[in-house]
Amino acid sequence: DQQVKQNSPSLSVQEGRISILNCDYTNSMFDYFLWYKKYPAEGPTFLISISSIKDKNEDGRFTVFLNKSAKHLSLHIVPSQPGDSAVYFCALYNQGGKLIFGQGTELSVKP
Amino acid sequence: EAGVAQSPRYKIIEKRQSVAFWCNPISGHATLYWYQQILGQGPKLLIQFQNNGVVDDSQLPKDRFSAERLKGVDSTLKIQPAKLEDSAVYLCASSSYDRGRSPLHFGNGTRLTVT
């Protein structure tokens, strides 16, 4: 029973263009949403988050959008840089305080 | 601030052997987590501690996995006996809030290979 899904295992984008990573969830009781970035042989690093009372949060080149009616979360990276190449995980807090991760999307930014 | 420390970085064992992982969280972080990440999947929570008490261990295979956090600081996760399907990266994380929605800070993990 996968409550959090990242349907694209991989994404390739040209440097300078926009990267859009998507995440869908099934339970409307999730109340806080995060994105993590993971380089090989390292642990996940927190990137950006959004509360369920908002629909957008921006931090430099990174913007997270939340569409509660569609149960959809997305991360936009503009402009994409080669150093952004990594695996990106969405992670959602349920009301019990448990953080549940998606399967990850591997982003490759080509120079 | 110093990050979450984990050791060892890599471990190779044969099935039915035992193994232990160690974690030292960020200083002052009351909450500590152990996650299992199988290749191609997202991290899955095994156990969550608040100080030295267990908050959630619903997904910990208790017949073979055990974890403790004595004195509310360092933690160890043990597998005995190991199975092939235990091959994964074991991630430790910590956070400063017990019921908040703060981001978790992860260590670099221990990659376990069971042959």
Image (tube, coloured by chain):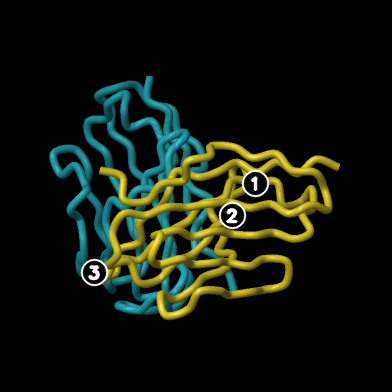
Report the residue marked by disc 2.
Answer: A37
Earlier sequence position, callout 1 versus callout 2: 2
Provide the chain ID for the residue under circle 2: A
- For label 2, the SS is strand
- The reply to whether callout 1 and callout 2 are in contact (CB within 8 Å) is yes
- The amino acid type, in three-letter code, at marker 1 is Ala
Report the residue marked by disc 1.
Answer: A86
- For label 3, the SS is loop
Instruction: Using a 10 Å C-alpha cutoff, classify the residue at mark 1 as few (fewer than 14 neighbours), some (14 to 19) or many (20 or more).
Output: many
Earlier sequence position, callout 2 versus callout 3: 2
Residue A5 vs residue B61, the one in the foreground? A5
C-alpha separation, residue under disc 1 versus residue under disc 2: 6 Å
Provide the chain ID for the residue under circle 3: A
Instruction: Using a 10 Å C-alpha cutoff, classify the residue at mark 3 as few (fewer than 14 neighbours), some (14 to 19) or many (20 or more).
Output: few
Left or right relative to B64: residue A61? right
- The amino acid type, in three-letter code, at marker 2 is Lys
Earlier sequence position, callout 1 versus callout 3: 1
C-alpha separation, residue under disc 1 versus residue under disc 3: 30 Å
Q: Residue at x 49, y 73 (%)?
A: A50
- The amino acid type, in three-letter code, at marker 3 is Gly
Q: Residue at x 59, y 64 (%)?
A: A47
Give the colour chain B carries in the figure. cyan
Instruction: Using a 10 Å C-alpha cutoff, classify the residue at mark 2 as few (fewer than 14 neighbours), some (14 to 19) or many (20 or more).
Output: many
